[in-house]
Amino acid sequence: MAETPARLTWPRLLAYGLPGLPVGALGVPVFIFLPTFYSQEVGLSLATVGAILLIARLWDVVTDPAIGALSDRTRGRLGRRRPWMLAATPLLMLSVWMLFRPPEDAGAMHLLVWSLVFYLGWTMIQLPHGAWGAELSPDYDERSRIAGSREALVVIGTILAASTPLMLGAEGTVPPGATLAALAVALMVVIPLTVGVAAAAVPDHNEPAAQPVPWSESRRLLLENKPFLRLILAYVINGLANGLPATLFLLFVEHVLAAPEEQGKLLAVYFACGIIGVPLWLAVARRFGKHRTWCTAMTINAVIFAFVPLLGAGDAGIFLAICVATGLCLGADLTLPSAIQADVVDVDTARGGGRRTGLYFAFWGMATKLALALAVGIAFGLLDAAGFDAAAENAPAALLALALLYAGLPVVLKTVAIMLMWGFPLDRDAQADLREEIRRKQARNVTGT
């Protein structure tokens, strides 16, 4: 008999998604405000900031697999995922405070040390949270709904963080440092509150830990999981395509569009349209499948974004329309890959890998963070080489380099990701077959036949 999982109630779905709120609120300052703050206000060079943030993200190569594997094997009264999120809460709060409100003598070493601590705490919340959601249901479409609840809260958190300069600067432009200081205070409340509600309201499977798979067999299963390899490659490429404009947004609006006072409004509109797009893309995915819907959203995004390098000073109104259109695609870009990730884990489980959801989400977490770190390193490094100066007026050639890095290169990268994912083999029917195979194996293990 096939599995017939119950749908999560809306209150429980909301409770599960709540930790996405601070995760989203952290993304904007870390990838948009923090690099600009440490280069413009603290006084570090663009190349130094890019190199430090790249080193800090490479730290995830160590922490992500360790936390993923350990959370897979954790067993206790609170389950497998919740203990890690609760333990990470004070660690993340401390590192946020030190990074967002640094002392006056802060320099490169301060940025490096507290970035390492920050990314460790962030991983300990974000990675178990994603794996937890993947285990709440085995159903193809319900997984989209669960991922959608989490990513919708991520987008809401992003909107609130992106709107902070607008709320603080009703009478003028707000420097990144003031925005980070205000966000630090808000996050001291939001992080423990949201993690606490999720831990109290949502069940976490407390099953016996999976039997460790020998390394040679584990490696073989990973390398033979073709959907996993295909997805993670597309995920890295698309992550880099998203990371470049996220990193360069403030610089693009200030120096190319010459409209620094519009930064907060443009970010808020973009992410507000993103959350509006979530239910729309989930409805499309129920009809056409997750990977085809994701490819469609990426295609629309790339076609529209291809016009951005043609913009210049005075084109903030046109760019606002582009933010609306590409923002509507954001819901698919955030929600559907996460739901596909849960399906790819089933391939490993069906072939004997055990319940290694945490380990697989660790690989995807590493892919995402590495892509964003590469975006910072590549963008700031090439801008520095092109003679761009964030604190001065720049020559046309430097502004062109900024525009091409902001929009031209991401269009090329998204095109490659679309080509990788269009023929993805794991659709609704294939995933249902995998779940039936897993159910039969579990039944044989119980009966001993």
Image: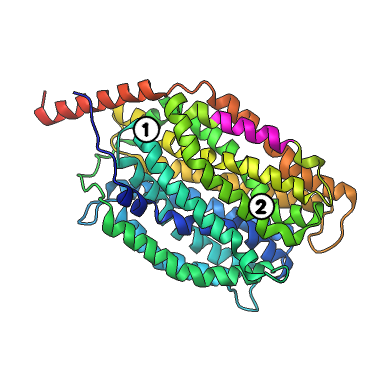
Judge whether residue 298 is colored magenta: yes
Q: Residue at x 46, y 57 (%)?
A: 21
Q: Circle 2 — which element?
A: helix
Q: Position of residue 414 (x, y in %)?
A: 63, 33
The amino acid marked with disc number 2 is Thr
Q: Residue at x 59, y 37 (%)?
A: 238
> Quick check: 248 above or below 412?
below
Q: Is residue 83 left or right of residue 125?
A: left
N-terminal label among 1 and 2: 1
Q: Residue at x 25, y 50 (%)?
A: 203
Q: Residue 141 — which label?
A: 1
Q: CA distance from mark 1 to mark 2?
A: 33 Å
Judge whether residue 11 is colored magenta: no
Q: Position of residue 442 (x, y in %)?
A: 19, 30
Q: Residues within 10 Å of mark 1 (few under 14, many from 20)?
A: some
Front residue (pair 353, 28): 28
Which region shows up in magenta?
295-306
Location of residue 322 by image quarter: top right
Q: Position of residue 135 (x, y in %)?
A: 31, 41
The amino acid marked with disc number 1 is Asp
Query: Mark 2 — residue?
Result: 247
Location of residue 197 by image quarter: bottom left
